[in-house]
Image (cartoon, rainbow, N blue to C red):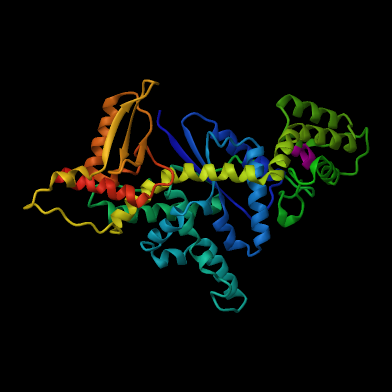
Amino acid sequence: MAITRVLTGITTTGTPHLGNYVGAIRPAIAASRRDGVESFFFLADYHALIKCDDPARIERSRMELAATWLAAGLDPARVTFYRQSDIPEIPELTWLLTCVTAKGQMNRAHAYKAAADANTAAGEDTDAGVTMGLYCYPILMAADILMFNAHQVPVGRDQIQHIEMARDVAQRFNHLFGAASGREFFVLPEAVIEEQVAVLPGLDGRKMSKSYDNTVPLFAGGAKALKEAIARIVTDSKLPGEPKDPDSSALVTLFEAFATPEQAAAFRAELVAGLGWGEAKQRLFELIDAEIAPMRARYEALIAQPAELEALLMAGAAKARATAAPLLAALRDAVGLRRMVAAPVAAAPKAKTEKAALPVFKQYREADGRFYFKLAAADGRVLLQSAAFAGGREAGEWVKRLKTEGSAALAGAPVVPVEGGAAEELAQALDALRAAAAE
């Protein structure tokens, strides 16, 4: 089965509310459980710095968002869940991409144009208040996506341009640096437009948004805050016993976001029959709290134990870097950022002692009946460990490819650099084997 990589970023500038849960969190977690999907979820804390200069808010939001997604059911064993700032390969890739991105393309980015147009309308300098973070935001977003060669990126319509820019930058890099090796380093990502995302009404009937100050809290304040917020939902003035119009009530829309079809139909019928708004709000609270309460308990436990959150995120970072480091090593080699090693001298055959100093691939079979290989340095340190293979032939083919192609074959290879090992040392070892094979 072909695997589709899906990448989702969450900007760490706020605390999720009920609308975020129904519209984004719940469907994204459900999608991550589908067969054939490899999901990457990250806390976009570098992006948050573009919008927010309050360190306390950034710190608090990172913790609250991580705890929210995990409490809502995101499985770190099934997905790759990490903080953007824990992956040093991302800012390095951002610079590599910046060097092939046209300034004119950045001039056309929606966020920059909106800021520039607002300044012009106000009679100010075009770039007043515009930081390079805002200006280069699309390049950082492209690095987020291309670092993991995501096939799909779920976005709203306002973000389509950024995915198109990521595709343009990827194509240019592939053309400039992949032609010599006949290799395309980057997959061209596709935007997945979330047409069916549920948009919940807020307390006043408008779209639930912090900008309107009409949100219903997800976990903050506990059951008491949830019940109090629901009590403030605006309804008409009809009394108990009078028929209500379910289609004109924001309360009904909220109810249906958590109810089964049978529950929703019964609720509508009761409103038409005269159910009072007070009782209807109590029913809504009980329905939502039944789903949220177990998550709230997990959320509160995580917030109370930040060390557990930190451990989960660091494990996710290690998992993400196992994918990012080999690709970045290949990209560095492609642009010429290579180790300075002496070229082999054809007239002077190497002594046996020199050959003995080369790193060595070792293939073996474990007790589970599956085949593996590893790369050991001359001093015995393990630099690279493969994943499991069903047959020895497949493992051998990968060893042959790594020997003949060197570090360029790392991207996409079913291998993991050994924790604590240096990506540059691994790349140097593979390139030494490639040079030896070419003699």
> Could you say which quadrant of the image residue 363 lies in?
top left
> Could you say which quadrant of the image residue 251 lies in?
top right
> Could you say which quadrant of the image residue 383 lies in?
top left
Residue at 38 percent across and 29 percent down: it is 388
Residue 182 location in percent, x, y? 24, 47
Kindly report the secondary structure that dominates the magenta region of the rendered protein. Answer: helix
Question: What's drawn in magenta, residue-wise?
Answer: 247-254
Residue at 60 percent across and 46 percent down: it is 310
Residue 409 location in percent, x, y? 29, 43
User: From the viewer's perspective, is 413 left or right of 356?
Assistant: right
Q: Which sits in the foreground, 24 or 434? A: 434
Q: Which sits in the foreground, 403 or 255? A: 403
Image quarter in which the N terminus is found: top left
Determine if the magenta segment contains residue 325: no
Q: Which sits in the foreground, 164 or 73? A: 73
Q: Can residue 363 be seen in this view?
A: yes
Decide: is 400 above or below 422.
above
User: From the viewer's perspective, is 361 left or right of 308?
Assistant: left
Determine if the magenta segment contains residue 253: yes
Q: Which sits in the foreground, 93 or 211? A: 93
Q: Can residue 41 be seen in this view?
A: no
Residue 336 location in percent, x, y? 28, 59
